[in-house]
Image (tube, rainbow, N blue to C red):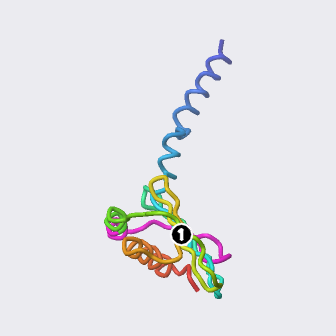
Amino acid sequence: MRITALIALALVHCALTTPTASAAGAQKKVLVELREQGGFAGIDNHVIVYASGCARLRHRTDRAVAMCLTNGEMRGLRGDLKRLRLGRSEAEPPGADFIKYTLAYRGHRIARYSLPSTWRPVVRRLEKILQKHGVTA
């Protein structure tokens, strides 16, 4: 009887102290993702901003950096995203010195080689965050 009570108490403790799957999932819900690749310089930047306001930044083969955006950065990014029109992916142009921009937002992933006008504010803001946090060379 005593062992059963201890096991039950341990199970209740684990249930109360272990985060639920939905709480863990909400923490990692991606708001927007940008990947820049290519060019003669070998660009390979990757930015993931989560709905929580935290982000994961990586430049080329450097170690990824985790950080959280300021309230102002998040407000600006959300405003830019409201105006974003993803459109369709673009075919790779002939030649060698092109940068491929891939944006993932609201379940869509689109790749472009030229930046449409509604993409520019989002891409520039995410690039600025990379630079601000010392991730770019």
Provide residue 4's location: percent of width, then percent of height.
65, 16
What is the tally of numbered marks visible in this picture?
Answer: 1
Provide residue 72's location: percent of width, then percent of height.
32, 70
Question: As displayed, is residue 121 above or below residue 103?
Answer: below
Q: Which residues are magenta?
A: 58-76
Provide residue 82's location: percent of width, then percent of height.
33, 62
Q: Residue at x 59, y 78 (%)?
A: 93
Provide residue 52's location: percent of width, then percent of height.
43, 56
11 with respect to 117 (left or right): right
* Foreground pick, 102 / 9: 102
62 with respect to 27 (left or right): right
* Foreground pick, 54 / 59: 59
Q: Taking the image as drawn, is residue 73 in sight?
A: yes
Circle 1 residue: 90
Query: In the figure, residue 41 lies in which quadrant?
Result: bottom right
Question: As displayed, is residue 91 above or below residue 4?
Answer: below
